[in-house]
Image (cartoon, grey):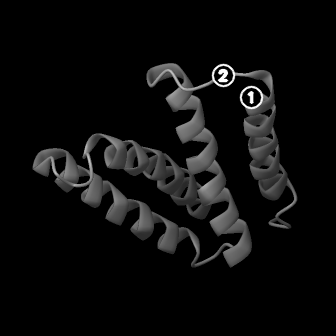
């Protein structure tokens, strides 16, 4: 795995972090949480931009959002008591399958 993929994975993890931060900042009314959220958000964009220097735009963006969406949904199930019905789990698995498929078939040597 080259550095671009490493940056992209870190960017996706940061996206999960800032999504949770948005939830806990309560509309940016909690200053401490809001500051951390914005810092993690900026870091996520910086890491995504670094990954896009060598990875195709569509691949990088889709994987970044896929990691963020699936990761946030999974953590929401475990930590925020969000619904965990069968169809929701299947949909999350489809997102993960899409992310893995984009990585596997990215055409990178």
Could you say which quadrant of the image residue 23 lies in? top left
Residue 54 placement (x, y as % from top left):
63, 76
Residue 59 placement (x, y as % from top left):
73, 67
Give the vertical position of 85 relative to 39 (above or below).
Answer: above
Q: Is residue 20 left or right of residue 13?
A: left
Residue at 80% over, 30% down: 87
Give the vertical position of 104 relative to 62 (above or below).
Answer: above
Pointers 2 and 1 in contact (C-beta within 8 Å): yes
Q: Secondary structure at mark 1?
A: helix
Residue 31 in sight: yes
Residue 56 in sight: no
Q: Secondary structure at mark 2?
A: loop
Could you tell me how far apart the alpha carbons at marks 2 and 1 are, in whole angstroms? Answer: 7 Å
Q: Nearer the viewer, residue 57 or 50?
A: 57
Image quarter where the C terminus lies is: bottom right
Q: Earlier in the sequence, mark 2 or mark 1?
A: 2
Residue at 74% over, 42% down: 96
Q: Which mark is residue 11?
A: none
> What residue is pinned by disc 2?
84
Residue 68 placement (x, y as % from top left):
56, 49
């Amino acid at each position: 795995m080259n550095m671009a993929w490493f940056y992209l994975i870190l960017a996706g993890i940061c996206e999960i972090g800032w999504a949770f931060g948005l939830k806990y900042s309560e509309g940016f009314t909690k200053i401490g949480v809001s500051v951390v959220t914005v810092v993690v958000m900026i870091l996520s964009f910086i890491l995504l931009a670094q990954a896009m220097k060598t990875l195709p735009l569509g691949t990088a963006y889709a994987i970044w959002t896929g990691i963020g969406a699936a990761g946030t949904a999974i953590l929401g199930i475990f930590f925020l008591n969000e619904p965990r019905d069968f169809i929701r789990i299947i949909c999350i698995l489809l997102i993960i399958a899409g992310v893995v498929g984009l990585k596997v078939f990215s055409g990178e040597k």
